[in-house]
Image (cartoon, rainbow, N blue to C red):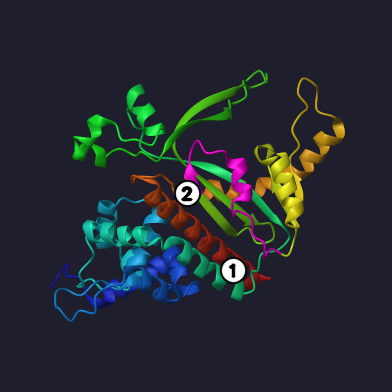
Amino acid sequence: MKGQVGFFDVDERLQRLSDLGDQLEAYAATVDFEIFRSSLEAALAYADGVKGGRPAYDAVMMFKILVIQAQNNLSDERTEFLINDRLSFMRFLGLSLGERVPDAKTIWLFRERLTRAGAIETLFDRFDQAVRAAGYIAMAGQIVDASLVAAPKQRNTDAEKAEIKAGRIPPEWSNNPARLRQKDRDARWTVKFSKAKPRIDGTISVDIAIPTFGYQNHISADRRHGLIRKWAVTDAAAYEGRMLRQGLLDKTNTGSAVWADTAYRSRKNEAFLIRNGFTSQIHRKKPAGRPMPTPMRRGNGRKSAVRAHIEHVFAEQKDRMGLFIRTIGLARARLKIGLANLVYNIKRFIWLERTAAVT
């Protein structure tokens, strides 16, 4: 019948998508997603089906859906629609046109189970083991930095803010469960300073204070391969320099050098680095009330040439992946940001493999 889609029509369309460079096809060809199965099944602890009922969706397929979400910054509802709409998504998930697609609620419940199980750290480490086995061990030292990740702004009164900071629930919220569910009591406000664009006449630009509500993604990436090796999530107001001493450094890196900006320069951090066998390449702070000495300025410049590479990680996550926290609470934000870090490593691993094949 004219207009009816046939098997060969779908096959030809998929081939066309491959010719155009389907990124998800590259994911499937380079990454064995079965490595995540045991960790997923342990976290989900699904029933064995003896009591009947509709069987659960395949755990690896559902995890791939979260990968799609992280890659494209999609809500659950938008994800459900696009899986039904896009052949590239269906192929990546192993779904045929006639198969049932998980709905938005199923996707949400799957992600919630992973959140409650605290599974993202295990899944991230599992992929890190895989890239190390492929020959990409952490080398040449590491670069540490943090980036703000915005969340929906909260419109709270001063009294409500005071209660939250004190670790209490405002009385008005306790009596209104629906309102309480929509309030993020873990995220915090902070101010980010950014340079204004240079004027046409070339005069010096000024710092602009940008209030931001949300969380921070703290990462440590190895210098040689640019892969994220360690990460942590805090509220946006947390002092990033303190995270250096709280498990953010990768002790398996073959290089001892640690690069970071002046936020990480402190006596405690310097002592910690020496005590644990690291070499500090952290930027030095300008002396108060005096111009920065030329040797110090030049030294910071050399350090910046290395440290600047970590900005590519955050640019990928924010500009291309559109990283934004839609969920409420630190635990869910940790899963969301952890997935973004994992997907970044997948993309980086694909690039490394292609580069190795060319050379």
**Residue nearest the viewer, comparing 351 with 143:** 143
Q: Is residue 331 above or below residue 21?
A: above
Q: Quick check: 205 left or right of 130? A: right
At 64% across and 69% down in the image, what residue appears? 136
At 35% across and 73% down in the image, what residue appears? 41
Residue under label 2, please give it.
320
Residue 88 appears in the picture as rendered: no
**Residue nearest the viewer, comparing 1 with 335:** 335
Q: How many marks?
A: 2
Residue under label 1, please give it.
354
Residue 22: image location, x then y, percent: 43, 64
| 248 falls in the magenta region | yes
Residue stretch in magenta:
233-253
Residue 134: quarter of image:
bottom right
Question: Extreme bottom residue here?
Answer: 50
What is the secondary structure assignment of the residue under circle 2?
A: helix
